[in-house]
Amino acid sequence: MDCALIFRNQHPQSVKYLIQLLLIFALLPTVGAQKQSSEYQVEACRTYETIEIDGDLSEPGWRNAKPVDRFVQIEPYEGSPASQPMEVRILYDDNYIYFGFTCFDSDLSKLVANELRRDARDLHENDNVFILLDTYNDRRSGFFFRINSLGAMQDSKVINGGDSMNRDWDIVWECRTKVNENNWVLEVAIPFSQLRFEKQEHMVWGINLGREIPRNKEEAIWSPVSKSYGGMAKYRTANLAQLTGLAGIVPSRNLEISPYILPGLTKNDNYTNRVLDSGLDLKYGVTPNLTADFTYNTDFAQVEADQEEVNLTRFDLFFPEKRPFFLEGAGLFDFGIPRASFRRPPPLLLFYSRRIGIEEGNAIPITAGAKITGKTGPYGIGVLNVLTDEFSNQEDGIDISSTNYTVTRMKRDVLDQSSVGLIVVNKQESDKYNRSGGLDFLYRPNENFNVQGMWARTFDEEDIGSPETDPSDQENAWSVGSRWRNDLFRLEGLYVDVGENFNPEVGFIRRQGIRRIRSEMRYTPWPRKFGVRRVWIGPEIDCILNQDNQLETRDMTLLSWFEFESGGWINFRTKHTLEHLEEEEEIRGIVISAGKYSFSSFSTMIESDESKMVSGRIGANFGGFWDGSRRGVDLGISFKPNGHFSFQSGYEFNQVELEKESFNASVLSTRLSYSISTTLFAKVFAQWNNADDMISTNFLLNYIYRPGSDFYFVFNQINESVSTSNSSSESTFIVKMTYWWHP
């Protein structure tokens, strides 16, 4: 693709200024990580003996390693010594870095341990320890590992200094735990081949270590972090200590091959279809810092179905990416309006990987894909190319030709924690294309303040011989926002401008042709009175105008959120909405006439301590809704008697009464899990959505028979039109086996 084609047209003056600013940033030098005092340095000890990962630190090498044993609280009493002692020792050899944790406890009967499954969402509600590694030592990103006392594992990728997380990132690593008379012990082995770092004879990494004790609502950490960051404090890369002593380690270029075989059967009222499929994923270190991923005949049969949601807006819902191939390096490809989590809906993304291989709930076959991600010097580099096959579904009116997707991303580190970057995205079909390109920057002079901005442009061409050449700025989008915080206050501001014809077909955008101004203020004291630990309270205003600066939407919200010492919380939200529709819109098939609408609503939610055996939530909302009213409830319950069995269920109900028509919108979901061990579990996930008149059931059996190698049995059933006599069903049975080969 010719990059000049992306930026061929004349841009608005404001965009020129932004480009000039980015070029100035790009010429600035990088600044290395801040040096820590010797108090926050630890030396990894090389070992030449075999370390058996069994939860027993009996090998002589562990005694030779100097322990880290001074931990302080983030919460509840910032800066105070941890209530329970802990020692951490670090070893390494040519292939692995090892961590040995000894967690002392005055009352082991109070350990919270009710999760065995890998990457369990509520693992942080258990007694656990965590490791944060910044292998490039640039204080911008990191690898996060969490393990509970049962040996359940969780790994995540930390992005943007800890501002955002990719919790679906996975690697192959090992751990074992053992509960003794007065402590529990954890042994961890992380292969160097699974990490990314620069080749140096003597390496220095950023590191932090910590522990969470739910019964005390306590988070303890080695290198201190301010509690003003709340639950995100442990992910802050600016506060890392230093790990020294790693010498003679060469970043792996080892080849990793993961083939799969998949026999399956699909059956509905009209036909039975049998399949026998196979494919593979391949990973190779192109250079010490750049990793190439290849996939052929990609299959995602083991990925859980999306959570059903009640959509009472006129805009598309956002669903997070869960497919493994697209998760490697996903943080690098992130471009758009800042977001705290990859699971949260953003106002704008220039690249949204779920646009590839998914169309209106249908899985589009992915023939092949390739990706290169990594970092060389101050530059982060990512290149993605995916080819999808033809697909047709007459019932849904889908007829898609073979399509090629290409994404190129580059980010450059500048100053201490700032960056500039660019992205180019191309969707190419046989007779048409959609292209987009953009520039972004992050300026963070300190931990309490940052400014972030981006500019992007899209191009469409129905016929390759007849390009559109609209010289206006209606195919542009740009934004600038800022965040500031201290121990008592948080301030945020954002401005977004999206042209009428801005159309990123491989991205995500809620509204086009708008100018958005959003501001938020929060007062965040820690009263510690009357059972209240922390308070969040403050207003936010969100105004959306069209390109003629006429008001379309205005939301004014007052939020009050109270966290209790018991671990639960309650919130109250009051909202006033003003809507001005130039044209009629549809919500769930009901026409909302053009005109002005003004209405107010109130909602509340209370949730108990999720670390308890039984926990739950109850919420309610009521108030105006367009030319009518809305009322609803949100209920949830969780039962986790031990690490083996868990039951979770949720129900959301909304009753909407409009001038023309009334309706009810309900979603019921239930998840049952049983874990025999950390390597063998079964799960049933069932959902009912009254809007689609559908019940879906997903059963998954997963056996990890060796690290990185899995056996899956999957059963999916969808029942449609369940409330009518014309109900139909489709069932799918799949057996899938993968093998991780690391020659």
Image (cartoon, rainbow, N blue to C red):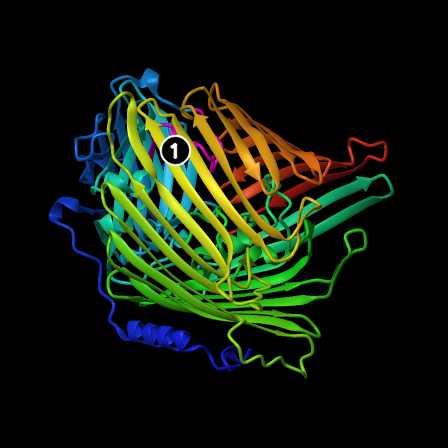
Q: Image check: 521 left or right of 582? A: left
| Residue 540, x across and y down, in percent | 39, 46
Residues 78 and 40: in front is 78
**Nearer to the camera, 583 or 449:** 583
What residue is drawn where x is 28% and y is 28%?
533
Q: Give me the residue at 33% from left, 37% from top.
A: 537
Judged by its main secondary structure, the magenta piece is loop
Query: Where in the figure is residue 549, as x and y percent of width and height?
Result: 48, 64
Q: Residue furthest right?
A: 270
Which residue corresponds to mark 1? 124
The amino acid type, in three-letter code, at marker 1 is: His
Is 115 magenta? The answer is yes
Quadrant where the image shows the N terminus: bottom right
Question: In the image, is 297 to the left or to the right of 494?
Answer: right
How many marks are shown on the rendered structure? Answer: 1
The range drawn in magenta is: 114-129
Does the segment drawn in magenta span residue 480? no
Q: Identify which residue is drawn at 86% across, 43% down.
A: 271
Residue 359 placed where, x, y %? 67, 54
Which class describes the residues within 10 Å of circle 1: few (<14), some (14-19), or many (20+)? many
Percent position (x, y) of residue 661?
71, 38
**Nearer to the camera, 195 or 345:** 345
Q: Nearer the viewer, residue 141 or 711?
A: 141
Residue 617 seen: yes
Mark 1 secondary-structure assignment:
helix
Residue 293 located left or right of residue 247: right
Please indicate, yes or no, whether residue 58 appears anywhere in the rendered image.
Answer: no
- In which quarter of the view is residue 647 placed? top right
